[in-house]
Amino acid sequence: MNRRLSCLAAAAVALTLPAAASAQTASSPASSVTLYGLLDMSAGRFQDAGAQRTLRAESGKMTTSFLGFKGAEDLGGTLKVKFALEHYLRADTGAAGRANGEAFWGRNAYVGVQGDFGTSTLGRNTTPLFVSTLSFNAFGDSFGFSPSIRQVFAPSTGLAFQGDTAWNNSLLYNTSNTEGYNVGLIANLGEGAPGATGRNIGGNWVLLTDTWGATIAYQQVKNGLAAVPAGFERQETLQFGGSYDFSVAKLYAQATRVKTRATVDTKSTIYGLGVAVPVGALGKVVAQYGQANADFNPGEVKNRTVTLGYDHALSKLTDAYAVVMSDRLTNAENGTSVAAGLRVRF
């Protein structure tokens, strides 16, 4: 698959060269640079299962706060060069990154080309698996409150998820179409990083219509490790997701399996069910349940999380929300979080 992705990227670049050359002889091409981002702040009582209960003002619980710059230059016809630089930030302290020590442009940092053939970007790219996971649960990309995001990408069961939500040194390709579906393919190079055993590969297929949607996503991780198990070879993740909009309510469902090949093989199976119910023209009630079963061979650890919230649009760019979350973990004290927050896009 790595070889196919490399051939596809080379072919895409080769096809764009004649158009790029002819564009240089035309009048000054159109270009643009945009500043954009999101700030999310909430306050309340936060407690994960097995953790201490604390009163906090927190950044990025509903959506991780970030600041970004993106630009595009028209090279003629449908061909464009594009770039993006995006960094996470913590609005509660003013610090950069999701955590201390994270790269400044940790959300995305890439340059690429876009045309009738699709879009190819090279650099640090968001993975197709993360896109599928956030698209098919009621709380989107919330690391604070979405059971799906928490249990897949930041599990509390003791089995680490490898590879993060974006990959360094990666090539990402997405199709261009007008029929509601997208195919995404990504691959990266380990470049001799500590713990690396090879290249990462991944992809997804997403179909969205006016009433329903579906996705299949897969990735294999051999570098960019969060923690290196003894004898680590690879971690494979397979996910299926779906949604259906009944107008009075939108339903979400996901099933994910994460398998790690190492001296001791481990496996996690994660299920998610969610619903979003419109309340008038500006509000919605959202709920999501997630269950993660982690097999340690022998033994099993279960994490059950349910979140209920209300989101109200104050404008096209600003919304306020309130959330209650219950988090349960095998052999740990139950945790309950209650918070309210404000999210501003610009």
Image (cartoon, rainbow, N blue to C red):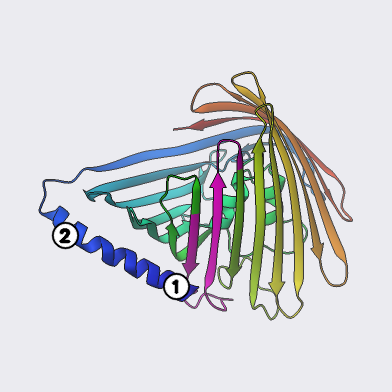
Residue that mark 2 sits on: 21
Q: In which quarter of the image is the C terminus?
A: top left
Q: How far from the left and from the top, in percent, is residue 250?
A: 67, 34
Residue type at numbered disc 2: Ala
Task: Assess disc 1: are there few (<14), some (14-19) or many (≥20) residues with their C-alpha within 10 Å of its C-alpha.
Answer: few
Residue type at numbered disc 1: Arg
**Quarter residue 238 falls in:** bottom right
**Quarter residue 334 falls in:** top right
Q: Which residue is drawn at 52% across and 27% down?
A: 318
| Residue 185 is a magenta residue | yes
Q: Residue at x 45, y 65 (%)?
A: 170
Q: What stretch is highlighted in magenta?
A: 183-212
Left or right: 115, with 272 as reference point: left
Residue lying farthest to the top in this orientation: 280
User: In the rendered structure, which disc, 1 or 2, sits on the residue that comes first in sequence?
Assistant: 1
Q: How far apart are marks 1 and 2 (CA)?
A: 26 Å
Residue lying farthest to the front in this orientation: 179
Measured along the vertical axis of the image, is residue 111 above or below residue 68? Answer: below
Residue that mark 1 sits on: 4
Closer-to-camera residue (234/144): 234
Measured along the vertical axis of the image, is residue 233 above or below residue 49? Answer: below
Q: How far from the left and from the top, in percent, is residue 38?
A: 49, 37
Q: How far from the left and from the top, in percent, is residue 166?
A: 52, 58
**Quarter residue 311 falls in:** top right
Closer-to-camera residue (41/26): 26
Left or right: 345, with 73 as reference point: right
Q: Which residue is drawn at 84% across and 72% down?
A: 297
Task: Assess disc 2: are there few (<14), some (14-19) or many (≥20) residues with their C-alpha within 10 Å of its C-alpha.
Answer: few
Q: Residue at x 21, y 43 (%)?
A: 30
Cβ atoms under marks 1 and 2 closer than 8 Å: no
Q: How far from the left and from the top, in percent, is residue 7?
A: 38, 72
Left or right: 128, with 327 as reference point: left
